[in-house]
Every structure is written in structure tokens, then in C-alpha cells.
Amino acid sequence: MEQPATAQKPQPDPASEQREEESVHRALERYYRSGKPPWDTGVTPPELVALVEGPGALSPGRALELGCGTGTNAVYLGQRGWEVEAVDLVDGAVDLARQKAAEAGVAVRVLHGDATRLDELDVPGPFDLFFDLSCFCGIPLHRRDAYAAGLTERAAPGARLLMFGYGPEPVGNPVPEVASWAAGVTADELRARFTGWELLDVTPGTNPVPTFWFTLRRGA
Ligand SMILES: C[S@@+](CC[C@H](N)C(=O)[O-])C[C@H]1O[C@@H](n2cnc3c(N)ncnc32)[C@H](O)[C@@H]1O
């Protein structure tokens, strides 16, 4: 008898997943090797300033920045009394972030590693605040659940996650073999992946392409 057609979920292909991760890593390293990457403005975004200093500001606690780049925002949080740990995949970025923290005289702990493999790093938490400025939206899709699980395991009750991300296919895909860079991030994706969290707010960014500021809160 003929079987009803069922939607086929693509099978994971570990070799192509690894190739994609390597492509992302190489592309990011190229950005840092070529000088100052376009995102490295040295300016802390007003959305983070509002959360830390604005009306109803969070009290300083423990913060983890994912994809900290050269450390501008990790240093900012350290200067505002937060106990900060920060992670980046690119060793050149980590060196610059450590230098920036040392020059500012703040005790930020900067770790070289993968935000989707926090178990391999010494960052047990719990954290009251996670900050991600354009890291998650570039992570290969097959690693995103691991990213969410890593934060969830390390979140204090009521912890916040402030994330900035590009929406789907924002600027064309600069690295075609990296599908995630065209996928971007959406509110629906965050709701699906971050179980046990509430998406409190989605505010469009001011960029010429679709971008978003997402605020999530871990359940108590
Ligand atoms: C668009 S840049 C933004 C850097 C920094 N947040 C800023 O605004 O200057 C994204 C950063 O995330 C880092 N990154 C990407 N994937 C990562 C991963 N899986 N683990 C840790 N860092 C990652 C990159 O190396 C890069 O520094």
C-alpha cells in the first residue's frame, strides 16, 4: 500500500557541519587580521546603557558576554560594577579585549573559546546578565540549540539576555557556504530555542537592513 508522504527532516551531516564551522571561523579571523572590523566601533550601544544605567536599571551582578570582540562592552560593564566574563572565538580579538581591559584597569576575564561549547570553558556562572552583540546571528544553525542550552544552564533565576542580531538575509550572504549568515535571527527562533525564557521585548534596530534588539528573561 502506498504510504502517505511525510515531511523529511534533513539528516545532520557532521562533515558539512564541521566545514561550516571552519568557514565561519576563517571568515571571522580574516576580518580581525584585515585591521579594524566594521563592527568594532568602540561605542557601547544605548540599549545596553539603558539596561545598566537607565530607569529601572539592573543591579550589578555577574555578566557573561558572548562574542565580545575587542571588549568594548565587557569593559563598560566592568566599569559599572559588574563582575564580567567574556568569550570570543578569535584569539586576536581576545588579545585586544584583554589589552583594553588592562588599559582601563578593570578586572574582566576574557576567554578564548566557543560560545556554543561553554562546558569546555571555565564559566560555571550563574550569571544575571548575558550580552550578545551580533554573535548568535552568525552562529551556524546546528550549534544554536547548544548556545541556548549553555546560557540556560548558567542563568540565575530571572537572568536577562540582551541580544542584538541581524534579521534574515540582511545584506546578501558574504560567505555563501555559511548558511547561517543568511538566516540571521528572528523572534520566533528565539522563542523556540530558549525554552524556560520569556521574550520580553523586540525592538527594531536603526540599521539600513533589518536588525533587532531582543530582551529575554529566564524564568524564576
Ligand atoms: C559581529 S562581531 C561583534 C563583536 C562585538 N560584539 C562587537 O560588537 O564589537 C561577532 C563576534 O562574535 C564572535 N563569535 C562568532 N561566533 C562565535 C562563537 N561561536 N563563540 C564565540 N565568539 C563567537 C566573533 O569572533 C566576533 O568577534
Image (cartoon, grey):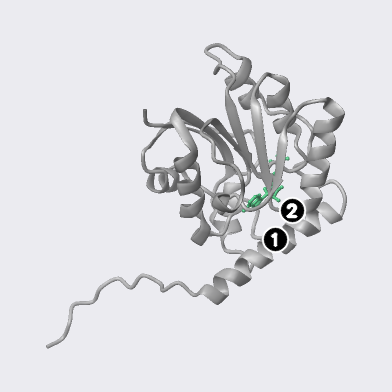
Q: Which residue is found at the position 72% from the left and 28% from the top?
A: 44
Question: What type is the residue that disc 2 sits on?
Answer: Val
Q: Residues within 10 Å of mark 1 (few under 14, many from 20)?
A: some
Decide which of tag 2 and tag 1 comes sooner along the chain: 1
Confirm if mark 1 falls within 8 A of ligand 1: yes
Q: Is the residue at mark 2 in contact range of ligand 1, meaning its CB lies under 8 Å from it?
A: yes
Q: Few, some or many C-alpha atoms within 10 Å of disc 2 (few <14, some 14-19, many ≥20)? A: many
Instruction: Say what secondary structure mark 2 lies in.
Output: loop
Residue beneath label 2, please? 90
Instruction: Kindly identify the residue that appears in the image at 57 percent across and 23 percent down.
Output: 61
In percent of the image, x 54 and y 51: which residue is there? Answer: 119
> Which of the image's four quarters has the N terminus?
bottom left
User: How far apart in space, not on screen, are marks 2 and 1 (Cα)?
Assistant: 7 Å
Q: Nearer the viewer, residue 50 or 206?
A: 50
Query: Which mark is drawn over residue 25?
Result: 1
* Coordinates of residue 165 in the picture (x, y in percent): 58, 43
Say if 153 sits above or below 27 in the image.
Answer: above
